[in-house]
Image: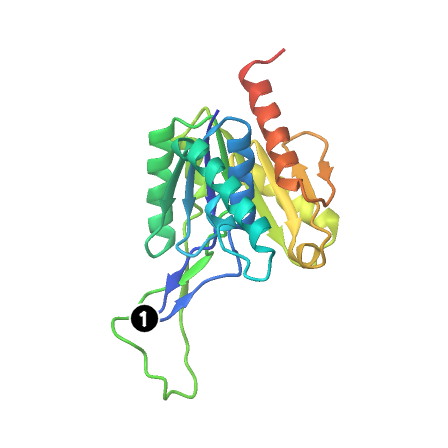
Amino acid sequence: MKVVVTGGGTSAPIDDVRVITNVSTGRTAAAIAEACLDRGDEVWHVHAPHAEPPLLRHARVDLDADPDAERARIDALRRLWLERRERLHLRPLKVGTVAEYSEALRLALAESAADLVFLPMAVSDYEPEPRAGKISSRLDDLTIPLRRTPKVIRSVRDWAPSAYLVGFKLLSGAPTAELIRAAREACLANRADLTVANDLEDVRAGRHALHLTRPDREVETLPAGPDLAERLVDRARFWAGERRHPV
């Protein structure tokens, strides 16, 4: 399959040196991209400047590890990289604004003719009008007006009408019923085929389950586990294939 994945968090500049961003690391997106590569897919990965990139995120050397074991791990990673790099198209953002992300995603969808699109990128809902220079640090109080940003995911169906679209809904401390209700609403508003719902408190507590929510279908929950991204990719690929080749 041709797959587009987005990851990390966007940034909203306040002035020349300050930004508003979020806690997203891009780890989930990188794991999804790696799972797609494992299955032979070609992947376009649009990511924030400091997000974890697929495969390359594992290249940091552990100085406390056994040297021989660490050398063997890096050698295996290098072989994997050489084998798969032709199928991985990294598209890093320079600043990471919502507008830059929107354009990079549009171009990736056009270039890839994507069959499957995963959008775990944490996109800013609000951003300020950036000010030139640097706001003084002598102020006791600072008010920063914010304006709502466009919902980029709502344009994807127009940019890639035939792609199987997977959106993500993250809440924090919400009851499961509320989380699933929000995911169902997002599915309809975003014209998504699937919305993956999870809760930040569960993620931080090591209970990172995913609730796979589709319009007019029963919710399927993937329990926490080390292969969570692989299981998500397998379900999405199956449903994408089912839609393209209905029985």
**Mark 1 residue type:** Asp
Q: Which residue is mark 1?
A: 15
Front residue of this view, candidates 139 and 84 = 84
Front residue of this view, candidates 163 and 74 = 74
Q: Quadrant of the C terminus?
A: top right
What is the residue that sits farthest to the top in this orientation?
A: 247
Where residue 152 sits in the image (x, y, percent)? 42, 44
State left or right for residue 151 relative to residue 211.
left
Tell me the element at label 1.
loop
What is the residue that sits farthest to the front in this orientation?
A: 68
Say which quarter of the image contains residue 181: top right
- Seen at 69% across and 41% down, the residue is 211
Q: Is residue 29 visible?
A: no
- Seen at 66% across and 41% down, the residue is 228
Where residue 87 sits in the image (x, y, percent)? 42, 31
Where residue 214 sits in the image (x, y, percent)? 63, 33
Figure coloring: rainbow
- Seen at 59% across and 13% down, the residue is 246
- Seen at 41% across and 77% down, the residue is 143
Residue 139 lies, with reference to residue 75, above or below; the image says below
Say which quarter of the image contains residue 148: bottom left
State left or right for residue 228 relative to residue 164.
right
Q: Is residue 38 visible?
A: yes
Front residue of this view, candidates 203 and 150 = 203
Task: Determine crowd level at label 1: few under 14, some 14-19, many 20+ residues with C-alpha closer than 10 A.
Answer: some
Residue 85 lies, with reference to residue 226, above or below; the image says above
Where residue 111 sits in the image (x, y, percent)? 33, 30
